């Protein structure tokens, strides 16, 4: 490794295709199709057709075995130079922000001068597989040398072996869904249903206002005949949200998470261009902001910690690294996997007991000005294609800071597996 001083990691900008509820407008689109669309959106936006980018890092959470190097195939399908190196990464909902962190570190240390971080996901094209027993039979048939060996491979066959299996968002260690885990968190932190519905309502209203005001005009690029996100509900009301039944705890009478205050399964892709300042200057590309700090953390949810509480730890460590307080930001982008998750996170940071016992701090991190949180809406309004959320947020925050002229933003993303990733974006 070189001993040269670290370079600043510039965020040039990003684009995404519209996000759509699964099994609706993108039923015929694959992860490869959507990721290629997001990459081409960035290529067109910044005049990169035929250009060899330092690296492209991207991934998907729900993917087929045939997509063993999804990102490289997307690059070869895009307008980028085929000489562009690409690799695939996977960190559940933090996938594309993790890709940006990895690529940013390479830019900072001089290994590459430019990069595209991206993510895609679809559950409309989910991989459906046979049971392990039947799959093993098919392998034996494939390897068989004689007809008798082929027949022997099906000895003891039962029709139930043909029952297909599809992927789900459940945790392998607990056999519980993310929503079920979040219900436990909501009860532990005493998060009210009304507060969750209000956060969801606000997300839709802020997103609708930003869309009407033109904020997303250069961020969302038409794809496959779709021009805008189809989950956004500008006409939603608190009264409508209040009528929805619990989606995960349906029996205790105390369930508070509903389809309205939880993100739906979503298809979509997003991408962000990162670079060194010299590379950007050579191409006359203005810098929106800089990716300055990234931190990950995990919690022991199997032993009882809240599955989606890891961002509370990641942010605390991030603030220590940057020598900042929780209040030293102009924008907060807190991924809205569930309204309850956001509210649990905010309440934890306000708790002396939690911050002292779990985060090892002398006192609570404190509260955040609600007016600075997810100012153009977030996942409850747009939807959440798992791996695409990180770069969606990064692109939004870069533009917000560019419009403001200066400032600092904090990103917080929870992920499956009890992990979290946080980042700081700054514009001097």
Image: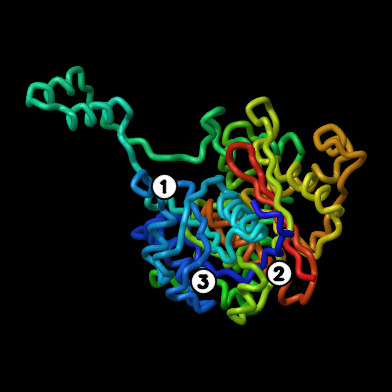
In the image, taking residue 52 as reference, residue 183 lies left or right, namely right
Q: Could you tell me if residue 25 is visible in this image? A: no
In the image, taking residue 362 as reference, residue 125 lies left or right, namely left
Q: Nearer the viewer, mark 1 or mark 3?
A: 3
Residue 80 image position (x, y, % from top left) = 43, 69
**Under tag 2, what secondary structure?**
strand
Q: Could you tell me if residue 107 is visible in this image? A: yes
Measure how far apart labels 1 and 3 are at the Cα level: 23 Å
Up-down relation of residue 377 to residue 357 (above or below)? below
Answer with the quarter of the image where residue 226 lies. Answer: bottom left
Crowdedness near tag 3: few (<14), some (14–19) or many (≥20) residues, C-alpha within 10 Å: many
N-terminal of the pair, mark 1 or mark 3, is: 3
Answer with the quarter of the image where residue 282 lies. Answer: bottom right
Q: Which residue is mark 3?
A: 42
Q: Quadrant of the C terminus?
A: bottom right
Query: Which residue is rendered at x = 81% and y = 61% of the image?
Result: 329
Q: Which residue is mark 2?
A: 289
Q: Which mark is residue 83?
A: none
Up-down relation of residue 35 to residue 192 (above or below)? below
**Under tag 1, what secondary structure?**
loop
Answer with the quarter of the image where residue 218 lies. Answer: bottom right
Q: In terms of depth relative to the viewer, which is nearer, 92 or 72?
A: 72
Q: Residue furthest bottom?
A: 284
N-terminal of the pair, mark 3 or mark 2, is: 3
Q: In terms of depth relative to the viewer, which is nearer, 79 or 363?
A: 79
Crowdedness near tag 1: few (<14), some (14–19) or many (≥20) residues, C-alpha within 10 Å: many
Query: Which residue is rendered at x = 38% and y = 62% of the image?
Result: 33
Residue 228 image position (x, y, % from top left) = 50, 70
Q: Which residue is mark 1?
A: 63
């Amino acid at each position: 490794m070189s001993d040269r001083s670290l370079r600043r990691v510039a965020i040039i900008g990003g684009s995404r295709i519209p996000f759509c509820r699964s099994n609706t407008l993108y039923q015929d689109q694959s992860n490869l199709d959507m990721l290629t669309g997001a990459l081409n959106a960035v290529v067109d936006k910044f005049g990169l057709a035929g250009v060899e980018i330092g690296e492209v890092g991207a991934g998907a959470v729900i993917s087929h075995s045939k997509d063993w190097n999804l990102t490289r195939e997307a690059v070869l399908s895009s307008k980028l130079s085929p000489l562009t190196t690409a690799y695939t990464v996977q960190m559940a909902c933090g996938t594309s922000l993790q890709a940006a962190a990895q690529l940013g570190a390479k830019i900072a240390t001089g290994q590459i001068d430019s990069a595209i971080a991206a993510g895609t996901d679809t559950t409309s094209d989910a991989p459906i597989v046979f049971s392990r027993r039947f799959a093993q039979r098919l392998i034996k048939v494939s390897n068989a040398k004689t007809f008798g060996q082929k027949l022997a491979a099906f000895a003891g066959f039962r029709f139930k072996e043909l029952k297909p299996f599809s992927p789900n968002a459940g945790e392998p260690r607990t056999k519980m869904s993310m929503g079920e885990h979040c219900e436990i968190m909501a009860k532990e932190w005493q998060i009210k249903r009304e507060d969750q519905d209000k956060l969801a309502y606000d997300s839709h209203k802020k997103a609708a206002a930003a869309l009407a005001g033109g904020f997303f005009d250069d961020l969302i690029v038409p794809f496959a005949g779709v021009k805008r996100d189809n989950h956004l509900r500008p006409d939603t009301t608190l009264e409508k949200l209040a009528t929805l039944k619990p989606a995960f705890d349906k029996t205790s009478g105390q369930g508070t998470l509903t389809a309205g205050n939880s993100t739906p399964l979503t298809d979509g892709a997003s991408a962000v261009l990162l670079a060194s300042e010299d590379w950007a200057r050579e191409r006359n590309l203005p810098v929106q902001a800089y990716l300055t700090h990234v931190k990950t953390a995990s919690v022991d949810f199997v032993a009882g910690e809240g599955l989606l509480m890891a961002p509370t730890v990641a942010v605390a460590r991030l603030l220590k690294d940057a020598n900042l307080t929780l209040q030293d930001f102009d924008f907060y982008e807190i991924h809205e996997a569930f309204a309850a998750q956001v509210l649990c996170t905010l309440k934890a940071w306000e708790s002396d007991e939690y911050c002292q016992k779990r985060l090892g701090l002398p006192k609570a991190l404190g509260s955040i000005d609600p007016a600075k949180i997810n100012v153009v809406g977030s996942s409850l309004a747009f939807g959440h294609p798992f791996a695409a959320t990180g770069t969606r947020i990064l692109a939004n925050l870069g533009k917000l800071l560019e419009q403001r002229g200066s400032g600092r933003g904090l990103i917080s993303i929870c992920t499956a597996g009890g992990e979290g990733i946080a980042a700081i974006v700054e514009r001097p």
